[in-house]
């Protein structure tokens, strides 16, 4: 149950997808439930592919009336805020619940371009209200601009997710079938030394070109061993 932890993690909601659950567990230490909610650390949410947000819980309650009272006791002052809603099986109405909580915050709401975001979670067994403290950067999207790719190139979001499964005490990885280098790009983006190879020299050439054509500060150098078409990102 997520009730016992001071931080909540939200993920793309798909309880059937073991890959999403594995990424969440690797990054945060928590495994999401059917609603995409986990208990865990927010320290590495920024790198997430399917992990979305880290939320510091400010109040919990069995129901809306009790939660409203507890939020009022916090004495929150926040201008330019928005309350977001995550329905996780609870019976509460979104508009009624978010309005009731917003009325307990001193400050002006801003629904279109907020400076601060809160999250209100309604589960069958209770409710939680918290502050969104970190959100995945989705910086893998910039690699969509890589000029060299094929129809079979690994989607970059999936590549980031796979790289996120690497234990954090590992400093380097090798991809023996690197193709156009999706895994290499994402590994370098989170600070790993990445080396790859491919039987096809054309794939090797494409993998070398991609970091030079997009903004990838973590990628600084390629080296090549021609007989095996091996290259390295350091």
Image (tube, rainbow, N blue to C red):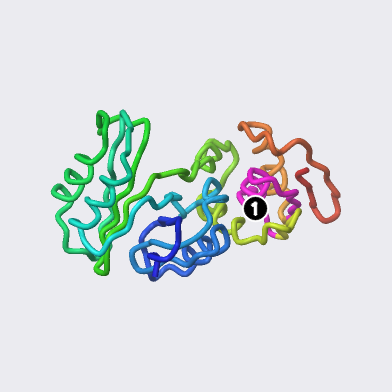
Which image quarter holds the C terminus? top right
Question: Helix or strand or loop: what does disc 1 sit on?
Answer: loop
Q: Position of residue 131 (x, y in %)?
A: 39, 45
Q: Residue at x 25, y 28 (%)?
A: 108
- Please give the range of residues in magenta: 177-197
Q: Residue at x 57, y 50 (%)?
A: 43
Q: Position of residue 119 (x, y in %)?
A: 32, 48
Q: Position of residue 52 (x, y in %)?
A: 43, 50
Number of disc labels: 1
Q: Is residue 187 magenta?
A: yes
Whether residue 95 sits left or right of residue 115 in the image: it is left
Q: Position of residue 24 (x, y in %)?
A: 50, 61
Q: Is residue 218 magenta?
A: no
Which image quarter holds the N terminus? bottom left
Circle 1 is placed at which residue position?
Answer: 179
Q: Residue at x 33, y 64 (%)?
A: 35
* Front residue (pair 169, 107): 107
Q: Residue at x 37, y 50 (%)?
A: 58
* Front residue (pair 70, 30): 70
- How many residues crowd mark 1 within 10 Å: few (<14), some (14–19), many (20+)? many
- When asked about the image quadrant of residue 159, the answer is bottom right
- When asked about the image quadrant of residue 84, the answer is top left
* Front residue (pair 84, 197): 84
* Front residue (pair 151, 88): 88
């Amino acid at each position: 149950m997520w009730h016992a932890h001071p931080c909540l993690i939200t993920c793309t909601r798909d309880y059937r997808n073991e890959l999403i659950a594995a990424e969440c567990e690797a990054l945060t230490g928590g495994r999401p439930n059917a609603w995409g909610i986990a208990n865990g650390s927010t320290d590495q949410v920024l790198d997430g592919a399917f992990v979305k947000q880290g939320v510091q819980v400010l109040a919990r309650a069995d129901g809306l009336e009790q939660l409203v009272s507890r939020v009022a006791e916090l004495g929150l002052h926040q201008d330019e805020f928005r309350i977001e809603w995550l329905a996780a099986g609870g019976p509460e109405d979104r508009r009624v619940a978010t309005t009731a909580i917003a009325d307990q915050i001193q400050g002006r709401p801003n629904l279109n371009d907020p400076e601060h975001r809160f999250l209100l979670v309604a589960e069958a067994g209770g409710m939680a209200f918290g502050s969104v403290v970190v959100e995945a950067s989705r910086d893998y999207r910039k690699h969509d601009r890589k000029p060299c790719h094929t129809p079979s190139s690994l989607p970059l979001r999936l590549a980031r997710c796979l790289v996120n499964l690497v234990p954090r005490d590992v400093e380097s990885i090798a991809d023996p079938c690197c193709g156009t280098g999706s895994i290499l790009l994402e590994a370098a983006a989170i600070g790993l030394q990445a080396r790859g190879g491919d039987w096809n020299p054309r794939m090797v050439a494409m993998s070398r070109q991609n970091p030079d054509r997009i903004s990838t500060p973590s990628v600084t150098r390629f080296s090549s061993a021609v007989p095996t078409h091996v290259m390295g990102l350091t």
